[in-house]
Amino acid sequence: MKKVGNHSSISRIYSFGLALMLTISLSSFAQEPAAPAATATPAAAPAAAAPAATAGGDAVKGKELFNANCAACHNLDRKMTGPALRGVAAKYDMPWLYKWINNSSALIKSGDAKAVKIYEEYNKSVMTAFPQLSTTDIDNIIAYTSEPKAEPVVSAAPPGTSTSVNEGISNNVILGALALVMLMLVVMLFLVNNVLTKIAKSNGIEASAKQPTMPIWKAFAKNQFLVLVSAIFLLLASGYFVYGFLMQVGVDQDYAPVQPIHYSHRIHAGSNGIDCKYCHSSARVSKHAGIPSLNVCMNCHKNIAEVSDTTATEEYSKAFYDKEIQKLYKAVGWDQSTQKYTGKTEPVKWVRIHNLPDFAYFNHSQHVTVAGIECQKCHGEVQTYEIQKQFAPLTMGWCIDCHRKTDVKMEGNAYYDKIHKELSKKYGVDKLTAAQMGGLECGKCHY
Amino acid sequence: MKSIIKITLVLGIIVSLSSCKDNASPNYQYMPNMYESVAYETYSESNAFNSPYGLKGQEGQLPAKGSIKRGYVPYEYADTPESFAAVKAANLASPLDPAKIDMKKAEELYVIYCAICHGNAGDGKGKLVTQGKFLGVPSYADRVLNEGSVNHVINYGLNSMGSYATQLNQEERWMVSAYVMKLKSEL
């Protein structure tokens, strides 16, 4: 009997590689428990600095009132239609504020110097009169505006970042130690192997005296039947792949180009629930769904200059999203500090994703308004896409397939009353598919 | 021998995995001549358009100044606080026959364009407001409104509310105005 030693060193290298990979992946798991240990101490908010100018209003109620009545034009820290209101109590006395808020135009007309000055400063835009607010209501609002600015959570960042650097170092140390251990293991195995072969030799056992056998490829080449079968198999397999390759030429499924503004459908249509047709409004009435012009964006973004902290994900930070909104402002020429358009605009060059060839005709209103098909049926779950992509292949087979399967929506469409009766008599069916209505005629899509 | 087979196997797997389709660039096309339009496509870039009055280098141009659409009815009130007050006072009548307005369609339009801020019931509690993204939307019940003033607001916007004239045509604006008045009466 023979011992077969040292069979194939290459498979050993593989198992080594596997072991190495496993340990590395283990070490990357090991990072996680390390993280909570490094929690930063939250920065203590300086709560003491509240100016005591207000007549002791309730800031919580004030916030409610502020959001309901004033937030359309005022922000605490940012200029909007009206000035930023934080600390306004320091600027005016309370009786003046009561008068101003109850009816600012009356105060301006009465010639009050302060009132006229701020009115002129804001290009004579009129602040709504709020006669319904009582003095206690106004006290509450002013109490809210007098609250000190909450320290942004980001201020905890300096200690946070330094700890994460520490973490990185400790990870590197762990990785280095692991690599060392692996190296030692390799060396030890090598040594053991050497020792074993030596022992074997001294015991008189010959390690791996290979018999000269015929190489397997020669044996294979001699067996003509096998050669024939495998040649056919290879031909068929490559034919299959070539066919698959040729069939996907010109099909752009999953095409997801990088857009000039990182605009996320997940945030707009998903978590904020904005209707598709709010932006793609011509899908209701025309061939094209259209990409919204920037004035549509500004309907909301005049007010929304930055995203909230909860919107940020691991992949995309708040700073990243805020930068994208700044790109929008640059393109429409919106100056945030003066809250005015500068008139300097530049087009946003969105990259077109869906594009049928010129010889095919597709009309959105026919499908969206007449047939009542949901956008999602053809474009996928757009409200979950962070980056827009092409969901459907947009091949002719795809169109035809759906026309064969989808019933035409007849109810409530007087146009179909007569043709429906005649066609369903002709086909002897109750419900007509788009195909039976003529949705397969070449001329409907090719002209 | 065996090691060569194994190495090629692994290399093959690596190559086939790493050469996945690049989704950020478009695919090849056969005979692109018949795919790409000879005529200018909507929104496309083009050097043919460089009139001193138009937008340079793009297919989408604004209509010439002063041109009006078929069926367009001029709206004589300007976008100023004074004319807004005048509209409110004048109580403009809608050109639509109130009995013939398709309220179902008006509701649909309202839900698409307005409900996101004003709420389905018009109480100022749309999704953007309840999530704290867009504040200061009033309830229709708290405002003095008439059909003409609502139409004016849709036309021009008001302070932080934008104009919806690009998304709704004249008739649709009056339909939505009628629907807003219906909501207000139910609040």
Image (cartoon, rainbow, N blue to C red):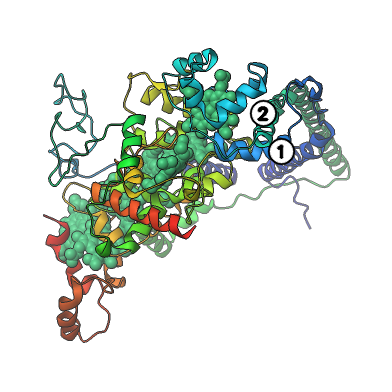
> From this viewpoint, is residue A301 visible?
yes
Rendered image: mark on residue A239: none
Identify residue for label 2. A142
Where residue A105 sits in the image (x, y, percent)?
47, 26
Name which residue lies at 66% across and 27% down: A145
Q: Residues within 10 Å of mark 1 (few under 14, many from 20)?
A: few
Mark nearest the camera among 1 and 2 is 2
Identify residue for label 1. A60
Residue situated in front as seen by the camera: A332 or B21: A332
Q: Amino acid at mark 1?
A: Val
- Looking at the image, residue A63 sits to the left or right of residue B68; the answer is right
Which part of the image, by quadrant, shows the N terminus of chain A?
Answer: bottom right
Measured Cα–Cα span from mark 1 to mark 2: 11 Å
- Looking at the image, residue B152 sits to the left or right of residue B21; the answer is left
Q: Residues within 10 Å of mark 2 (few under 14, many from 20)?
A: many
In what element is the residue under mark 1? helix
- Looking at the image, residue A374 sits to the left or right of residue A428; the answer is right
- Count of labels in the image: 2
Name which residue lies at 21% across and 23% down: B56
In what element is the residue under mark 2? helix
Upstream in the sequence, badge 1 or badge 2?
Answer: 1
Note whether A225 is above or below B44 in the view shown.
below
Name which residue lies at 63% across and 37% down: A134
Residue B108 lies in what quarter of the image?
bottom left
Note whether B106 is above or below B70 in the view shown.
below
Where residue B32 sits in the image (x, y, percent)?
19, 41
Residue A438 lies in what quarter of the image?
bottom left
Residue situated in front as seen by the camera: A239 or B60: B60
Q: Amino acid at mark 2?
A: Ile
